[in-house]
Image (cartoon, rainbow, N blue to C red):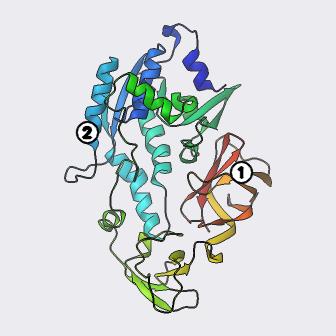
Amino acid sequence: MSANSNILRTKAKPSARPRTMVGLSGGVDSSVTAFLLATAGYPVEALFMKNWDEDDDDQCTAEQDYADAKSVSSQLGIPLHARNFSSEYWDRVFSECLSEFENGRTPNPDVLCNREIKFNVFLEHAHLLGAEKMATGHYARVSATDGKYKLLKARDEEKDQTYFLYMLNQQQLSHTMFPLGELTKTEVRRIAAQQNFVTHAKKDSTGICFIGERKFRDFLGRFLPAKPGHIITETGETIGTHDGVMYYTVGQRKGLQIGGRRGAKAEPWYVARKNVAENTLLVVQGDDHPLLFQAELNAGKITWIAGSAPDFPFYCKAKTRYRQTDQSCVVDSINDGTLRVSFDSPQRAITPGQSIVFYAGDECLGGGIIEA
């Protein structure tokens, strides 16, 4: 049984339970997280984070989210703090993502946000406010043995979010609780409905972490100027134009505007390669085209949750994107912290800038950024 479930079911006196700061986002998951801890007798407070200034933007929902967080905290009778981390988010997350996009890669803001904001800046403020622990509505679990912490998949594999948490370290995990790790999403919504939380039917947030749902190309174009170029086939034929390689990702189908060409097959086109130096997109037809598949990749900026790497080479499972089924692979060290990952079966649309995350059964070992 995970440390989270043990903590929630412990017989310890409330006074012995650590003061805990819940990241209350105004969503259903964090609402139920706060409820579970409060009803288990924890001294609970909540902190609402605003990480993006959207005063002139109707696409963000921070104002409504804050109102919902206030409603839930008031109903539970717990204090609610509010902090604006927009500056930290810009410096530590968004600026790095813009640099990656500009270089033709496809970063994952959610992974960086977890490392730099939710489990770093937030944790620091939780401590300043007198909390010993922090809790979020992530679907994941933490276990502890002899002072060593492991990040484990959630019981609900459809909702498991360890892919986005692989950059966390021992210190961060030692102060973290994931009360939803043993629950399914259906159970969470049922609890929220039973408590009559205003968030019980609120849809899950999607889009860029803390920035929300937007037309991606229009949003990115506010920060990176368009750089039109050619769309080419594997034979070198130019069949269209693009607005900038940063607006596209490997495996992308929509938005190419090259369908229905005379003499071409009826199959849809997909982005297979992005050439930043030549400002070109290489496209192929058919979702099973060989150029969309690779059996190996190199990864850098490696993080090991245990604090040190396993003995190389080693056999494990891995994901190159969220919700992907775990894939069998061999991981070996090349040099200077770079890894080579060889898959048992070729993988579709491996994307530089995205994360590869390693697993041994339910345990998330860590991961890195796909380089090539």
* Front residue (pair 25, 176): 25
In the rendered structure, which amino acid carries the disc numbered 1? Lys
Badge 2 local density, few (<14 within 10 Å), some, or many (20+)?
few
Q: Find residue 160 and report its horizontal and vertical position in percent.
A: 56, 41
User: Residue 64 — which label?
Assistant: 2
Which quadrant of the view contains residue 339?
bottom right
Q: Find residue 240 and report its horizontal and vertical position in percent.
A: 42, 86
Spatial CA span between label 1 and label 2? 40 Å
Q: Which residue is mark 1?
A: 317
Quick one: SS at disc 1?
strand
Can residue 302 be seen in this snapshot?
Answer: no
**Left or right: 319 in relation to 137:** right
Q: Earlier in the sequence, mark 1 or mark 2?
A: 2
Task: Identify which residue is drawn at 64% across, 52% down.
Answer: 325
User: Residue 169 — which label?
Assistant: none
Can residue 31 be seen in this snapshot?
Answer: yes
Task: Identify which residue is drawn at 58% across, 72% down.
Answer: 287
Q: Find residue 336 and report its horizontal and vertical position in percent.
A: 68, 60
Q: Find residue 356 and report its horizontal and vertical position in percent.
A: 62, 56
Task: Identify which residue is drawn at 62% across, 59% down.
Answer: 300
* Front residue (pair 187, 101): 187
Task: Identify which residue is drawn at 59% across, 45% down.
Answer: 166
Please determine whether, in this image, residue 361 is positioned above or below residue 19.
below
Quadrant showing the N terminus: top right
